[in-house]
Amino acid sequence: MPSESVLSATEVSKTVDGPDGRLTILDGVSLDVARGASLAIVGASGSGKTTLLGLLAGLDRPSTGSVTLAGQLLDTLDEEARARLRRRLVGFVFQSFHLLPALNAEENVMLPLELEGSSDAASRARDALARVGLDARRHHYPHQLSGGEQQRVALARAFVHGPEVLFADEPTGNLDQRTGAVVSDLLFALNREHGTTLVLVTHDVALAGRCERSLRLVDGRIDRLAAEGRGQALPAERAAGEGRA
Amino acid sequence: MKPLTFAARSLRREFFHGELATLFAALVLAVAALAAVATLASRVERAIVASAAELIGGDLGVSSSRALPPEFTAEAETLGLRHTELADFPSVVFVGDKSRLCDVRAAGRGFPLRGVLAVRDASGPEKNVHEPEAGSVYVDHEVLVALGVGVGASVQVGGREFRLAGEIVRSPDSGNVFRLAPRLVMNYADAESVGLMGPGSRVRHRLLVAGETASVDAFAAWAKPKLPAGAEITTVEDAQQNLRTAFERGESFLRLAALLAALLSGIAVALAAQRFAKRKTEEVALLKCLGASRGEIIAALTLEIALLALPACVIGLALGLGMQEVVIAFARDLLPGATPPLPLGPPLAAFAIGLAVLFGFALPPLLRLRDVEPMRVFRQDLDARPRRFDALYLLPFAVGGALIAIEAGNARLAVTLGAGFLIIALATWLLGFVLLRILRSGGKRLPGALRFGLANLARRRALSLLQAGALALSLTALAVLGVIAPSLLDRWRLELAPDTPNYFMINLQPEQRDSMQQRLAALGATNVGMLPLAVGKLVAINGVAPKADDFEDKRAANWINGEMRLSWSDTLPPANKLKLGRWFDGSETEPSLSVDTMWVDMFHLKLGDTLTLRVGERDITARVASIRGVNWDSFRVNFFLMLDPKTGETLPHSLVTSFHAPAGVSAQLGTLSRDFPNISLVDVNAILDRVRDIVDRVGRAAGWVLAFSVAAGVLVLLAALAATADERRFEIALLRTLGAHARQLSLAVLGEFVALGLLAGLIAAIGAAGIGIALAQGVFKLENYWPPAWPLLSLIAAAAALVAFAGWAGTLRIARTPPMAILRKA
């Protein structure tokens, strides 16, 4: 198992002000993810999975606690610096694909490369699309693609610039079982090929099971008892029970 | 990221999806309307000025009490202008023992440069001539009668014999009512050689020029800083108060129309941009998520808009210029005489204003996108941080305000429109806010579907208020253009009613009053007004002799150094309005005066001040008893100063008469001149025709602009409806899924839109009426204007119905779409 940590969170909490007073979404979450590892974050709706993913990716700031990504303490960076860090180090796959409707498949895949200022964006995007089996459809616009094809384009976009960490939010949540299986196979295959660290949010137990480790969130806290109660805790859940993954 | 590449790609794809096409169309319309109107207005104005130039005998005059330095004529020649010299002075003409004081005009070579000098020679027929040959003169009919001679006779001027070569029938300054002596035209060289223009003579010199508009403008610009003391530039507008007012009003009308079209387009742009920004929110969140910086995002969005704007402005410009060419081609008589060249300024200004409108109205919602949270990619209910006050939203107001200030070209028009629209926006916001509150609490008792529709309005409060505001402003603009402007034009035409006096008669003696009145009645003259006229000089104000330098208004010098005319009347004359004090009722115990407001301002007068006037050998000190506002465009005889009748009757005076003579009585009028040889008859038909002509042309040109404005108004309507279309589609699909039938959907949507239409319509009706009254009083100086209620209400009702219908029709289309298709897209 690789040992060097690429992503860590220390006592991360997130609170928001709602109509009924202050609401705690995440409460003292700590974790470590080693380079090249894969971690699944599972939990019921509203347990704080997506909020945690957003904090780990530097899309939002924690109310207390800190997050370190590739050795950079995110709290010390402003929004622009965090954006630059994401551009270099991070890839995303979303439940609802989030392809830009105005761009065709190839242009969507080119986007992270263009943000980096890459000069061979088009040829690398073509290669990435070929890898996900969509070479022939590179000039199609999102609305001309099926859900599975859109998510494959999103995968190509997520890996094309060789990110260190890939954040995936319910990547098969909007797909039927068969298509979902194809997409998840592709996701893990690409992950292996690129040696990317994967952080995956899902409530699909089977998908979570394909990750090396997994942690469960309940009401914004890492659930220690769940793992023990089920008696068949994944290694990651055990680690979660100890507060470290 | 390369923002330009990204922007170009996005534009390529998004152009055909709604908002950008609306933005594009709005911009094309704004630029087209501004370019067409401004260019057309400029050309019509130039053409009218050129044709009216015949009233002063040239395109431009420089008048001075001394002969102008030769560099003035040299410059005119350099610029390729035709030019001639004039000198006007009084002199007495003798034939034997008879004499007559004449207003002599010494005319240089080529006079008149514009217009017609027509004379009748001994053989009878009329012919158009230029300056008389050396040794001969032309005179008014009155001179022939006074001296008892005919054309061909010899007269003596300045001690030398001249041959009477013709009787003047028409001359370029025939509209000058207060030329107190009949005209004699002689050759300029003769006047010089006889010594009539030597030191001590009261000569007014004038250099007249005529030629290409650009050269005339260049000459005016060159001459202005070089004018000797006491010299001034005279244009047609300066020469005739009535014409100047007509020009100003006409220009204001056209500017008003173009401005409203541009503002309407601005509203459409703002609405479309709002929706565009809303749709772009997800994209911006994703780009941020992928690591795009704020700068890159804003650059890409701004560039996308710029890429859209440039072709839109070019197309708008081409369309606008093409349109005005079509108008000129179809309405050939819109431009009297030769078509003036295409001016460059107005089209360029339209182009620049188009860009300003786009960026001013579209940038605020787009720039707000920089605050979109990247977390929005996961949670779409996350809105950008709300701010209590966003200075960015002042930008459209600033651009709108600047647009009004620049384009109005008239402070009062700018303030009236600016304040009017601001008040309407605020009123809509306030009233809408209160109504939505009431709906929220009181709407519960309404039938289900209607309640749902109205609840929608209340729920989308910010959007509903924006929609209502945009609708109210655009309906107001349309009402001002479609109802208020035509009724103001009608009101203006009314000022020039068919029986508007077209002749003035001066020098009638009091004892001739009755017989003249009979003669006028016999030839069918109507609207006869007769007032006494005494000529005097202002000697003192509150006992102190006035000095021209003491008054900032330069016109004061004309009355301090020159003569002034006085009249009196038992009743307040028509076209006069008492502002302060009371009219004379015979109870005055001391000489009293009524003073026009212009004099009050010029000489800083107030009620109770005294003016000392010298009439003949007598000084009269009169107290200011009332202050009047005079409508100087009324084509009636008006006076700055009016004395109380008791004092007036004691002064030596003649009568001045204005009347309307029907067409075809010129022969009888000729007889009248022969039977009353002392009178001078002044024909103002030419000026009256010009003014009518301007009203007519402005009316027609404004009609063409209305077409643009209606198009812009429809675009605003579409943009306003589209603003909530996406949400409404989803709601309707949901209701459909839950089993709502078409009738219930229609009721819900109609409830929403009728409420919106009524709110906007009501405010627009009141707003347009208010703006109309303010425009009539402040800008167009039309007394007693009242906006027409029925057309205004009908227009508003129609607009409200159109809003409801458009909303309803859009909903029907959605209702026919299977709900699943819509829900899946959401």
Image: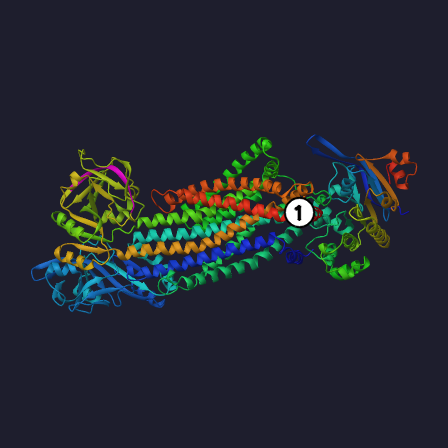
Query: Relative to the observer, which residue lies in front, A192 or B85?
Result: A192
In the displayed structure, B312 sits above or below B718; it is below
Q: Is residue B129 left or right of residue B393?
A: left
Residue B259 appears at what percent x and percent y?
Answer: 46, 51
Count the marks.
1
Q: Chief secondary structure of the magenta span?
A: strand
Kindly give the residue lying farthest to the right in the view shown.
A231
Query: Relative to the observer, which residue lies in front, A73 or B698?
Result: B698
Q: Secondary structure at mark 1?
A: helix
Work out whether residue B231 can be spotted: no
Q: Residue at x 73, y 32 (%)?
A: A23
Tell me the quarter of the picture where residue A243 sits: top right
Work out whether residue B780 can be spotted: yes
Colour scheme of the rendered structure: rainbow
Residue B165 appears at what percent x and percent y?
Answer: 17, 67
For label 1, the crowd category at 10 Å Cα-Cα, with few meaning under 14, some 14 to 19 and many 20 or more, is: many
Query: Relative to the observer, which residue lies in front, B644 or B108?
Result: B644
Task: Say if the magenta span includes residue B626.
Answer: yes
Q: Amino acid at mark 1?
A: Thr
Q: Is residue B361 left or right of residue B260?
A: right
Give the residues drawn in magenta, as a range. Answer: B619-631
In the displayed structure, B297 sits above or below B55; it is above
Kindly give the residue lying farthest to the left in the view shown.
B97
Location of the N terminus of chain B (image quadrant) = bottom right
Query: Relative to the observer, which residue lies in front, A148 or A42?
Result: A148
Task: Say if the magenta span includes residue B818.
Answer: no
Q: Residue at x 32, y 48 (%)?
A: B494
Q: Is residue B254 left or right of residue B662?
A: right
Residue B351 appears at what percent x and percent y?
Answer: 51, 57
Q: Chain of mark 1?
A: B
- Residue pointed to by mark 1: B281
Residue B769 appears at what percent x and percent y?
Answer: 42, 42
